[in-house]
Image (spheres, helix red, strand yellow):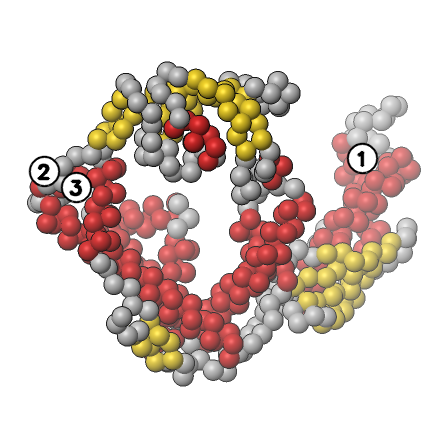
């Protein structure tokens, strides 16, 4: 059945800034009607001894399943009445409703009270007049050389070495055996990793560096204070290690042939130029991110407002993610530690949305089409194919969000003074 909102008694109270408490009364006549409907539906499908399926009288069903029928009817009625009441009061919750009170007696009205948060409406009186300094991030020759070295290492070849003890940046093949028979994971394991990249605890790496290829040894290793598993921090274990193999990375010569091999470059000069351009673009993006963040913080400071706790909670939960093995007390500690930053981030998002709405800066269909055309041009694909691909992957909404944010920040920068940090 569909509940007519005009038959409900609805009252709404404002509590905290964006918290609402709504009381709803469902007349007994609607409750009785829903119970009869539930009984009739159950009578058609229930099997009872002495009756043909679908022929059980409703009176028998009600006497045998009265409690279950009332609960089923109550669940449906409360859910539907809640939705109809929200529509009637033009309320749009941003959090799940929390039932605080529910009163129900047979052949009587149903009354329930439910609390929820609504989308905050913030007012921004000051949009500009700020002074923000853009940091200077210069790209040095050393930055280009380090990036070029990284490309060189990515294209290196791991070559086996038949003797000698390993050192940092060597790849090692190790057999590990825990010598404590009571250990829960006391099984032999094989590992292959690069030394000096924090892939193993320091004591393990130090032990491996003391071994020649093919040699074995027993060592006491202590788990460091920052080990991910808190229960093992500071614990010392006895392990047996055997160094099965060692490899060193042979690096190619950096010349024109190397540049042509790693990409579509005419030679080393073009590769180096591309690396510098990429680094400069990344530096520009980082400086712009600083300017955007500072502008948003100044807007929030100049136009203070509160945010619903439920929005902050959802943001925090999104940052933490699903971690089944995380102890509840540790999860609570982490949540509390990141809550201030989460609240700051939510305020920034709300400010962006409000500026976009009041200044009519939301991405238009034309904006999205132009962005899709640019992507298509870069990829060499037809725009309609790119659009369909983005739509299928669920990336049209993020694209729309990016366009809106760019328009908002361009507007905000036009309202304030952006200066460049002096050269050092």
Residue underneath mark 3: 263
Q: Are marks 1 and 2 in contact (CB under 8 Å)?
A: no
**Vertical relation: 210 (above or below) 260:** above
Q: Is residue 267 above or below residue 282?
A: above
Name the residue carrying label 2: 257
Question: Which of the two discs, 3 and 2, sits closer to the camera?
Answer: 2
Quote the CA–CA distance across marks 1 and 3: 73 Å
Q: Say left or right for 407 vs 312.
A: left
**Tag 1 secondary structure:** helix
SS for callout 3: loop
Judging depth in this view, the residue of 173 and 310 nearest the camera is: 173
Secondary structure under tag 2 reads helix
* Residue at the disc numbered 1: 43
Q: Position of residue 211 (x, y in %)?
A: 39, 23
Left/right placement of residue 375 relative to residue 297 reads left
For image coordinates 31% across by 61% down, the residue present is 285
Which of pointers 1 and 3 indicates the residue nearer the eye? Answer: 3
Residue 321 — which label? none
């Amino acid at each position: 059945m569909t509940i007519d909102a005009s038959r409900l008694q609805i009252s709404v109270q404002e509590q905290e800034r964006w918290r609402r408490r709504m009381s709803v009364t469902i007349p007994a006549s609607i409750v009785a009607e829903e119970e009869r409907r539930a009984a009739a539906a159950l009578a058609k499908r229930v099997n009872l001894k002495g009756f043909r399926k679908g022929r059980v009288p409703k009176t028998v069903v009600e006497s045998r399943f009265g409690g279950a029928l009332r609960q089923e009817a109550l669940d449906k009625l409360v859910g539907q009445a809640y939705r109809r009441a929200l529509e009637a009061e033009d309320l749009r919750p941003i959090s799940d409703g929390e039932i605080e009170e529910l009163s129900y007696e047979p052949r009587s009205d149903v009354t329930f009270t439910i609390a929820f948060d609504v989308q905050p409406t913030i007012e921004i009186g000051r949009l500009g007049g700020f002074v923000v300094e853009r940091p200077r991030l210069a790209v040095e020759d050393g930055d280009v050389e380090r990036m070029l070295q990284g490309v060189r290492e990515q294209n290196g070849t791991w070559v086996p070495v038949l003797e000698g003890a390993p050192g940092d940046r060597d790849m090692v093949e190790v057999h590990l055996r825990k010598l404590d028979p009571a250990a829960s994971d006391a099984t032999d394991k094989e590992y292959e990793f690069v030394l000096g990249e924090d892939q193993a605890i320091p004591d393990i790496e130090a032990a491996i560096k003391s071994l020649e290829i093919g040699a074995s040894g027993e060592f006491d290793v202590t788990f460091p204070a920052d080990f991910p598993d808190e229960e093992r921090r500071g614990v010392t274990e006895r392990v047996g290690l055997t160094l099965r193999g060692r490899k060193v990375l042979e690096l190619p010569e950096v010349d024109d042939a190397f540049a042509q091999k790693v990409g579509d470059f005419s030679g080393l000069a073009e590769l180096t130029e591309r690396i510098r351009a990429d680094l400069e673009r990344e530096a520009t993006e980082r400086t712009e991110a600083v300017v955007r963040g500072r502008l948003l913080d100044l807007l929030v400071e100049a136009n203070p407002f509160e945010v619903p706790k439920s929005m902050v909670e959802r943001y925090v939960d999104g940052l933490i993610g699903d971690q089944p093995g995380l102890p509840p007390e540790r999860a609570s500690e982490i949540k509390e530690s990141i809550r201030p930053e989460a609240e700051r981030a939510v305020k920034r998002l709300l400010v962006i949305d409000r500026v976009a709405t009041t200044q009519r800066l939301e991405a238009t269909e034309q904006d999205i089409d132009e962005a899709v055309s640019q992507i298509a041009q870069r990829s060499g694909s037809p725009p309609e194919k790119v659009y369909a691909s983005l739509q299928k992957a669920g990336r049209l909404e993020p694209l729309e969000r990016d366009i809106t944010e760019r328009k908002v920040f361009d507007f905000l920068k036009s309202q304030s003074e952006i200066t460049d940090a002096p050269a050092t």
